[in-house]
Amino acid sequence: MGMNGGNGTVPIGEELSHGLGEFLSGVSDCASLEIIALERLGGGAVQENYALDVHFSGGAMAGRHELVLRTDAPSGVAASRSRVDEFAVHKVAWEAGMKVPEPLWACGDDSLIGREFYVMRRLPGDARGHRLVRDPELDPVRDTLVERLGEELARLHAVEPPHPALDGLPQPPLSPAHARIQEYRGYLDALPEPQPVLEWGLRWLERKAPTSDDVVLCHCDYRTGNYLVEAGELTGILDWEFASWSDPLEDIAWFCARCWRFGQWHQEAGGMGSRDAFYRGYERISGKPVNRALIPYWEIMATVRWAVIALQQGFRHTSGEETSLELALTGRMVPEMELDILTQIEEVKREAFDHAQ
Amino acid sequence: MRNSPDAAGLLHIARETLLDEILESVPEERRQMLRMAANALAIAAREAEAGDTDLVKELRLLGELYGEEAVHAAGASLRERIAKMNKRFARDIRDGIFDGACAPGVHALLMDQVCARLRISNPGYLKAAGSRSAG
């Protein structure tokens, strides 16, 4: 969720820049270096990203580089990977040939700048969903863009467990659907108010849970808002903090779910383009057809997930952990997702009924 | 008796003042925040106007499902009863108590609860969804 973090130069303390400089100097093997800028980037309530400009003298990185330093926001939220584990997934995605910012170095030692962090190259582009879905300049290339996004996702889904670099991830679940249901029920149990509608959705998901043919590396937050577009071209997929082994349909449905269309309901692939184009790109690279019959199931799962997240965000406000107007209003969005869940379940039932006639 | 204007009246005029008299003087990058604040006031105004009507209806429907006696035993106040009954309702749904023949009735009850909440928090969303399913 964006908007929480403002832009602006962060005065980095002597100690912080010293720790960062020491780290960069070690990993780049340079003779000396200068941190030219370290500026907080907007977006990301859970992680903080800083635009980091460094001039290295000597070593493999000699010259000036535009980088991003990614670290935890002071209040961490459960269910996201540590920066070091995120770096490992990000690196696997890079090695799988995906369009991601090149990941450079990770630091699991939180004594250097006070938190774990990793460094990647900075790519140009805009990730703001509300802008991207409405930018008239993108209209001629919308389907091309979502087709590219389909291709990229298929490249990621080619990574199968086990993977030597991904030991930090939780074990691949036997049933991704049941694992999610259990996870979301756990989140609900941690909140003070009962949620009959979400329980209804979860119970339905439990009864209809499909067996997954594949369990692959999933991004688990693959959606508009988490990729960069520059001059009509996809420049990079961002935010690897939720990546897990799961059913590939979960990623496909999350991308297409109504809650991530930023109000552009008719553009079913992320509010950006057509579902057909997205599937076309995916199928071209994966060589396998997208199981369309199961997409509605996973879209209901997506809506339940977003509702649970919205509840958690609202609770962050009401509990006093972090008071914010945006978090408060997010909590009040829950009935929108609830209406979608009930409607989607009805639609699936109606289709099954029509099919049986 | 309370003074006039009532809570809803105050929230309405506060919202109008923000949007009609303050918004333009606020720098562009802060306007979204101000619109969000105005939205929060609108939600609060609708909630104040609705009073307990929705809660009374919700409890009546839960009473149809569980019986009046169960509702009375759940607490002394409206809010206490709603909280307890919904807790039981949520647990029963999870346990599969409503999987069978009563499912359509439960679905309708839940839809009723959701629509009541949406009329407060985002009536536009409800309206758009209505025209979507009609179309």
Image: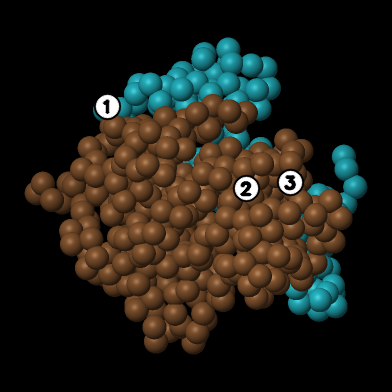
Q: Which mark is residue A112?
A: 3
For chain A, what colour was chosen?
Answer: brown
Is A97 placed left or right of A6 in the picture?
A: left
Q: Quadrant of the N terminus of chain A?
A: bottom right
The amino acid on which the numbered mark 1 sits, given as a three-letter code, is Gly
Label 3 with label 2: CB-CB less than 8 Å: yes
Where's residue A285, x and y in %? 24, 65
The mark lying in front, picked from 1 and 3, is 3
For chain B, what colour was chosen?
Answer: cyan
Between marks 3 and 2, how big is the CA–CA gap? 8 Å
Residue at mark 2:
A107
Please determine if labels 2 and 1 lie on a single subunit: no
Where's residue A152, x and y in %? 35, 65
The amino acid on which the numbered mark 3 sits, given as a three-letter code, is Leu
Query: Furthest-left residue in view?
Result: A357
Q: Chain of mark 1?
A: B
